[in-house]
Every structure is written in C-alpha cells, then in structure tokens.
Image (cartoon, rainbow, N blue to C red):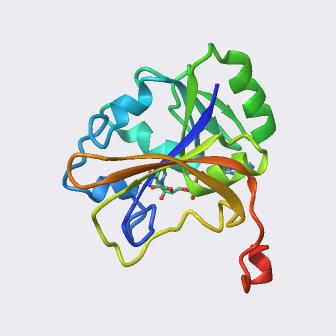
Amino acid sequence: MKIRARMSMSADGYVTTPTGWPALTADPAFVSGESHGIQEFLAGCEAALMGRTTFEPALANSRWPWPSLDVFVLASHRPAATPDHVVTDGDPVRLLERLRAANRGGDVHLVGGPRTIGTFHALGALDTLELVVLPLLFGGGTHLTPALDPAAGLTFRRQRALPGGAVEIVYSCEGSRSPLPGAPSSQR
Ligand SMILES: NC(=O)c1ccc[n+]([C@@H]2O[C@H](COP(=O)([O-])OP(=O)(O)OC[C@H]3O[C@@H](n4cnc5c(N)ncnc54)[C@H](OP(=O)(O)O)[C@@H]3O)[C@@H](O)[C@H]2O)c1
C-alpha cells in the first residue's frame, strides 16, 4: 500500500482558487471524476483519505465523489449526514492504523487538503506527491506550503502531459532536505 497525495494547482502555485475551491474546478477541461488522468490514477487505489474541510462539501454533492473507494476522514467530529461506511477519526496516528488494518493491497489516494497532507507527511506516511499543474494563473488562493513542511524532500519520478494542457508530475517523498539557505527560521 502506498499513500499518494494528488493535488491540482495553478501555474502560479495555488492549490485553491481565490474563493477556496480545489484548483482543478476552475479548469474548463474539468469533468468531475473523469478528466486530468484521474481514472488512470485511481486504477491502483482502493481508498481515499482526506481532511474534514475537503470532505464536507461532498456531503452536498448530487454525485458521491468516491464510488469505488473506501473513505477515511481526519476529523475531530463526524459531520452530520456522513454515510455509515465512511471512517472518521480525530487522531491521525489512529486513522492511519485503521487505514492499514483495512487495506487489501491497493493504494490510498490522499485527496488533501494541505493540512492533512502535511500531517501525514510529518508522520512519515506520505509515499508520493503527485501534482497536476493547470494552464491557469489565479493570482491568489492557498499554497501547499507551509502546511506541508517546505523541507519535504522530493525526488522526481515521472511526468505526463494531459489533454487540455495540464501536466502531471510525480515525486516520491523521501525524508527531508536541508533547509534553503536564507529561509526564515520558521521554515527550518
Ligand atoms: N487542489 C486540490 O487538488 C485540492 C484537493 C483537496 C482540497 N483542496 C482544497 O484544500 C482546502 C482545504 O485544505 P485544508 O488544509 O484547509 O483542510 P483539510 O486538510 O482538508 O482538513 C483540515 C481538517 O482536517 C483535520 N486535521 C488536519 N490535520 C490534523 C491533525 N494534525 N490532527 C488532527 N486533525 C487534523 C482537522 O479536522 P477538525 O477540524 O475536525 O479537527 C482540520 O480542520 C480547500 O479549500 C479545498 O478546496 C484542494
């Protein structure tokens, strides 16, 4: 089992639109559950893992976003109307244990957001960071850092061009690199 974070981002580095929606949703090429290589990505996955902030909008969707996946949510309380099969837990270590105990050999799609990716990275549980860089500039929004420690070490693995002008880049996460020279101490 590998835990694979996959995030869309604008070409100027924002993972949300200025109004807080996932970057992907601003792309005219976006089709929920179908575009940007998501089906190929999900072929090896059996579970989705995410933070409460990312999960809650799905409860109002007419279409359940993870029909073929077990769903695990990091949340200190169980949001109202959460389907019975969804596992929620407020303790990331315990949620990880429950995820591993349920695992049948498939990978885990770590959906986000940045705080939850940072949390599982800090636990040493993040295997890959997979970015879908969109051909869009937002001029504002949320960055992946500093919720994900800027000292996270990334090793390039592969890339592919996607229909519609986006590019998928896959990095493996292997420990931390040295702090950047001159980085503020809060980033060390
Ligand atoms: N670009 C993309 O592909 C993409 C993908 C997904 C999400 N997003 C965007 O990301 C944004 C949300 O990201 P986010 O980082 O603010 O929120 P998030 O990671 O989705 O959820 C945060 C929540 O997860 C729980 N949590 C996280 N770390 C924890 C820890 N160490 N210990 C205990 N609980 C922890 C807390 O739940 P409680 O408050 O219940 O304790 C926290 O409020 C949204 O704007 C969404 O649109 C973008």
Residue drawn at x 34%, y 53% is 167
Looking at the figure, which quarter contains the N terminus? top right
Tell which of 68 and 64 is nearer to you: 68
| Residue depicted at 50% across the width and 32% down the height | 81
Q: Is residue 124 left or right of residue 67?
A: right
Kindly give the residue lying farthest to the top in the view shown. Answer: 104
Left or right: 97, with 56 as reference point:
right
The one of 61 and 66 positioned closer to us in this rendering: 66
Q: For the view shown, which residue lies furthest in the bottom direction? A: 182
Quadrant of the drawing holding the C terminus: bottom right
Report x, y in % for residue 68: 43, 20
Q: Position of residue 79 (x, y in %)?
A: 57, 39
Please determine whether, in this image, residue 76 is positioned above or below residue 146: above
Question: Is any atom of residue 85 visible in this view?
Answer: yes
- Answer yes or no: is residue 64 visible: no
Name the foreground residue: 177 vs 16: 177
Provide residue 139's location: percent of width, then percent of height.
37, 78
